[in-house]
Amino acid sequence: MSTLEIRGLKVTVDTEQGVKEILKGVDLTIKSGETHAIMGPNGSGKSTLAYSIAGHPKYTIAGGTVTLDGADVLEMSVDERAKAGLFLAMQYPVEVPGVSVSNFLRTAATALRGEAPKLREWVGEVKSAMEGLKMDPSFAQRNVNEGFSGGEKKRHEIMQLELLKPKFAILDETDSGLDVDALRIVSEGVVRAKEANNLGVLLITHYTRILRYIQPDFVHVFAAGKVVEQGGPELAEKLEANGYAEYVGA
Amino acid sequence: MTTLQSNLLENHTPTGREEAWRFTPLKRLAGLHDGSAKPEARNSLTLNGTAQSGVSFTRGAVTAASASEDAIVNRIRNYTSDGAILAIDKNVVVDAPIFLNRSCGGVDTAELSRVQIRLGEHSKATVILENTGDTHLAEDLEIILAPGSDLTFISLQEWGSKAVYAATHNAIIDRDATFKAIHVTVGGDVVRLLPKVEFVGPGASADLQGVYFATAGQFFEHRMHVDHAVPRAKSNVNYKGALAGDKAHTVWIGDVYIRAAAEGTDTYELNRNLLLTDGARADSVPNLEIETGEIVGAGHASTTGRFDDEQLFYLMSRGIQEADARRLVVRGFFNEVIALIGNEEIQERLMTRIDDELEKAGK
Ligand SMILES: Nc1ncnc2c1ncn2[C@@H]1O[C@H](COP(=O)(O)OP(=O)(O)OP(=O)(O)O)[C@@H](O)[C@H]1O
Ligand SMILES: [Mg+2]
């Protein structure tokens, strides 16, 4: 049983107009096996929260703490955070020209497991992960995310989630841009990862549809850089019906 | 007179003020340009293995196939320390690559070398020139493609850290011939390499691919000159360079000249540079001069950028540590061209050299 704990997290970015505070004191605790959905208007800081936990250099921590089983995540380098068990499925996965998916996955697995996976078993693992997400085997030879469609990039993110077996995954709008079938396929991948590794999930989304496949234990409303309300799955239905009017500018 | 012509007109000792010499550190050229280098016959170019039938490698005098107004080429032609001709007879198709090797060198004297690679009509071959060790070498290399012939020419500059290499690789390409060149420069103190293309018959094509990686103090210059003098020839230039370390300096010049007679020309040139650290300098100058509007296409692009932190972040967020992530990105950057070599052993050797250079340069 692991715990990811975010306390009073404040984050700024450097803009041309000066330093801008985006996260204004975020509190959130996630335990293994739990699924937390975060919903909130555009620009409220959801991706900022995701990137800050993963350690993107663009964001400056201005206050607060993030700990994983008591260990200070904010002190860790980006790769150390992944080694500690954190995974971020990005809203906009990055293209890496000239680096094949197969080379990338094997390098990542070697780094995370501390030794190169045995070739035969590894080939099988990758094959079944790709099959699970209905990705054509030819993707293994393509360059990382290069020329992938939006939906293919998202499948590739969840394929990595299944292969790399983190303790906690932050899914930043993994459902955006997916067709109905892809949404189901990708969601099933997340559910498999949850069942296989007792994964804790922080799921950022704008739509309740994905929550039918990946049932949240908690729903958090995010507005203007902080969590403004928490509830159970019924809160998502209410947001879908009423929008965020009562949380913004009020 | 046009600028591109004036780039060639320099029948004298360069001073550094000429367009064609303005980037080159003349003081570090070991006297190859001004005649002060002490020539020595070394015959350092050798053919690996034995030539198959229809292929010959002979040493001796070389008769120029092209005019030159380049100062170094003229010095070589006035005093040639050694010459060699690799010839492939007409209609001969050589399946396995032909390896030429240049290794025995020395930096007390200089080698002024003339080389010709001749392809007979409708012949086909791949020639791989492997350059290693420390040397002072001026090289006038002509490549003569008879009608319908097909040559892939790979020149690997894996020189030692003291090497000074000034070379012209001039391809004279006749009707319907196909020329592919891959130049890889990953070693040497000073490298000044002039890949040139002269189309002398219509319907031919030239594809010039290249990569270079300069680390602290190294100077690598690659200066193309593609002369479209006849109709319907196609040329493509794609060079990628990376730089790391203080005073690493690269120069890429792409001169493409489309003469009035060259109707139906199709040409594109691209140079991309990746600056891995501060203190390095990449000069990149595409030049396109067009004397006829009756062409299929003519374009160029040049970019010089810093390391992409988003790529680094993406890889690191999957547990890959920074040094490995940088290595992956740099390998990826070069892979597009290196993979064209089509020889796993050489590709891996070059990538390992690039890894080593990157590691030496730190970050
Ligand atoms: N460099 C920057 N300059 C100015 N503002 C910035 C900069 N970087 C981020 N921001 C702002 O930070 C805010 C939060 O952005 P973030 O991407 O976290 O929002 P989000 O909640 O993920 O939105 P969405 O639902 O659209 O994905 C936005 O208003 C954005 O414009
Ligand atoms: Mg976002």
Image (spheres, coloured by chain):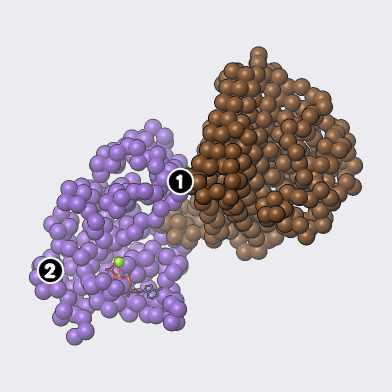
Chain colours: A purple, B brown
> In which image quadrant can residue B26 be found?
bottom right
> In which image quadrant can residue B143 be found?
top right
From this viewpoint, is residue B330 visible?
A: no
> In which image quadrant can residue B27 be found?
bottom right
**Residue tagged 2:** A240
| Relative horizontal placement of residue A72, taking residue B343 as reference (left or right) | left
Q: Position of residue B50 (x, y in %)?
A: 69, 18
| Relative horizontal placement of residue B137, taking residue B314 as reference (left or right) | right
| Dot placed on the residue nearer the N-terminal end, 2 or 1 | 1
Q: Position of residue B93 (x, y in %)?
A: 58, 19
Determine whether the residue tagged by mark 1 lies in a helix, strand or loop: strand
Q: Chain of mark 2?
A: A
Discs 2 and 1 share one subunit: yes
Q: Chain of mark 1?
A: A
Image region (quadrant) for ligand 1: bottom left
Query: Identity of the amino acid at label 2?
Result: Glu
Q: Residue at x 22, y 63 (%)?
A: A205
- Tell me the quadrant of the picture where the N terminus of chain B can be found: bottom right
- Tell me the quadrant of the picture where the C terminus of chain B can be found: bottom right
Q: Nearer the viewer, residue B95 or A30?
A: B95
**Residue tagged 1:** A99
Q: Residue at x 87, y 37 (%)?
A: B79
Q: Position of residue B332 (x, y in %)?
A: 50, 47
Query: Identity of the amino acid at label 1?
Result: Val
Mark 2: give few (<14), some (14-19) or many (20+) Cα within 10 Å: few
From this viewpoint, is residue B10 visible?
A: yes
Task: Single out the residue that lies furthest toward the top.
Answer: B53
Distance, label 2 to label 1, CA atoms, is: 41 Å
